[in-house]
C-alpha cells in the first residue's frame, strides 16, 4: 500500500489514480482524515450498488426475520426426492 500525505505535498488526481491502478493508496489529509483509494472491479461495483439499495436492504431485513428450520426429510419430500 502506498501512502500519500497531502499535508506534505501536492499530487495531481491523475498521478494518484495511476498509483491506485497497481496498489491501494492511503491518502492522508492535514485534517487527520484518511481515505483509501483502490482499483474497483465488477464485484466491487456490485457490492457498492447493493450496499446502497433500499430494495436489497429490505430483502435482507425480511430474511433475517425468518425463524425455524426445515427438517431434511421435509425438504426431500417437497422436492420429490
Image (cartoon, rainbow, N blue to C red):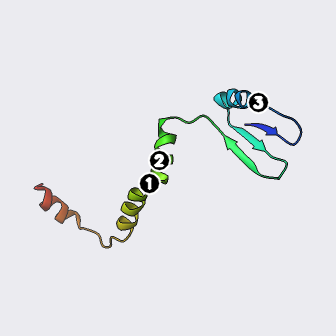
Q: Nearer the viewer, residue 19 or 74?
A: 19
| Of callouts 1 and 3, the N-terminal one | 3
Helix, strand or loop status at disc 3 = loop
From the viewer's perspective, tell me whether residue 61 is left or right of residue 32.
left
Circles 1 and 2 in contact, beta carbons < 8 Å: yes
Q: Residue 57, position in %: x, y?
A: 42, 60
Other residues around mark 3 within 10 Å, as few (<14) / some (14–19) / many (≥20): few
Residue named by callout 2: 49
From the viewer's perspective, tell me whether residue 71 is left or right of residue 4.
left
Give the image quarter of residue 2: top right
The N terminus lies in quadrant = top right
Q: Residue 31, position in %: x, y?
A: 83, 52
Q: Residue 27, position in %: x, y?
A: 76, 42
The C terminus lies in quadrant = bottom left
| Of callouts 2 and 3, the N-terminal one | 3
Q: Residue 37, position in %: x, y?
A: 67, 39
Write the residue at 17% across / 65% down: 74
Residue named by callout 3: 12
Write the residue at 40% across / 66% down: 61
Distance Cα–Cα, label 1 vs label 2: 6 Å
Amino acid at each position: 500500500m502506498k501512502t500519500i500525505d497531502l499535508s506534505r505535498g501536492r499530487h495531481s488526481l491523475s498521478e494518484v489514480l495511476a498509483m491506485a491502478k497497481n496498489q491501494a493508496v492511503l491518502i492522508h489529509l492535514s485534517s487527520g482524515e484518511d481515505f483509501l483509494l483502490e482499483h474497483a472491479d465488477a464485484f466491487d461495483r456490485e457490492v457498492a450498488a447493493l450496499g446502497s439499495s433500499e430494495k436489497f436492504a429490505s430483502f435482507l431485513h425480511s430474511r433475517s426475520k425468518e425463524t425455524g428450520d426445515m427438517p431434511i426429510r421435509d425438504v426431500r419430500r417437497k422436492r420429490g426426492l
